[in-house]
Image (tube, rainbow, N blue to C red):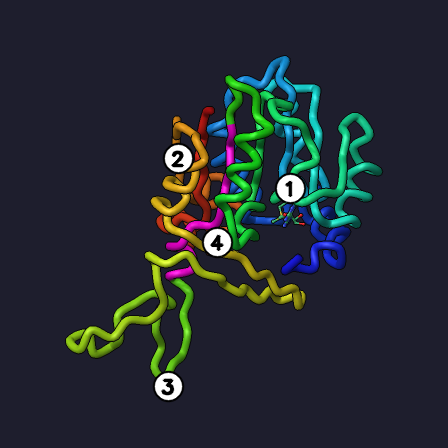
Amino acid sequence: MINDYDKFAKERQEQLKKGEKRPHRFIEKPMMRELLPDLTGKKVLMLGCGTGEENILLRAFGTTDIIGIDLSEESIRLAKESYPDCKFMVGDMHKLPFENNSFDFVYSSLAVHYSAEPESVYNEIYRVLNDTGRLLVSVGHPLRWACDEIEINNTKHRIISHGVDNENGEVYGNYNTFAKHDHYFKNGEVLSFYVGSPSFHFKKLKKAGFIIEDFSEGICTEECKYIDYNYWNKYHEIPQFMAFLAKK
Ligand SMILES: C[S@@+](CC[C@H](N)C(=O)[O-])C[C@H]1O[C@@H](n2cnc3c(N)ncnc32)[C@H](O)[C@@H]1O
């Protein structure tokens, strides 16, 4: 596991419950809500479910049959304690402990981008979905990381940019190449994940057999403008996440 989700599980859960995780509250969950279909009567897998809060969102779309799976033992312990009406288990998204055709719907928020091999995760999701099954998956958007600033030789650059002397073809970072990124949080948490372009994920999903039905780039909602203007200002023009709705 490349990240210490066990260590920060309790803190993350408290922040999620209080609505203090701005990317989730103002960008990612609204984006997912926009793409979620009716889930009445559907058997749903929450892949990379963390401490399980997303079951509340999925229930609002009609399902009562939810299984969550995550690699972090502490997250799953907290999920079981908090949401006894759902089933939760520890497991790896690269090798799902389920039979073929087990689910009607797979929901996965911000988890697939921790894999260095997203194609193997998409293949596993395809395998466990039944013939009319669908997937809603979100991952980080490369433009968000492109906009962070770095200093090289006393000159500030965007992570993905041409050099100051644009004439000689200098380039920093990449958009086109699937690559690992590290993000440092104020609380000491470091998250390492992999960022690919929209077309990279589109092609991997297609290769796994999926047909893409819808796509969204997550930008900050208007609600945020009145609660945290600076955050809204930063992210209402630049997408932080992207999501694909796909069918088998
Ligand atoms: C950013 S959190 C998202 C949690 C939840 N989906 C949400 O949006 O609140 C990413 C989660 O992916 C899980 N994860 C990372 N690698 C995984 C893997 N190989 N298999 C299953 N879960 C994994 C982490 O443990 C973590 O709980």
Q: Secondary structure at mark 3?
A: loop
Q: Nearer the viewer, mark 1 or mark 4?
A: 1
Horizontal relation, residue 69 to residue 195: left or right: right
Question: Reading the chain from its start, which is encountered first: label 2 or label 4?
Answer: 2
Question: Reading the chain from its start, which is encountered first: label 2 or label 1?
Answer: 1
Q: Secondary structure at mark 2?
A: helix
Q: Which amino acid is tagged 2?
A: Lys
The label on residue 231 is 4
Residue drawn 67% across and 45% down?
92
On the image, the x and y values in percent for residue 72 come to 73, 49
Question: Does 35 sit above or below residue 138?
Answer: above
Farthest residue in the bottom direction? 153
Q: Which residue is mark 3?
A: 154
Q: Which amino acid is tagged 4?
A: Tyr
On the image, the x and y values in percent for residue 96 come to 66, 37
The image quadrant that residue 99 belongs to is top right
Q: Which residue is mark 2?
A: 206
Q: Which amino acid is tagged 1?
A: Lys
Horizontal relation, residue 192 to residue 73: left or right: left
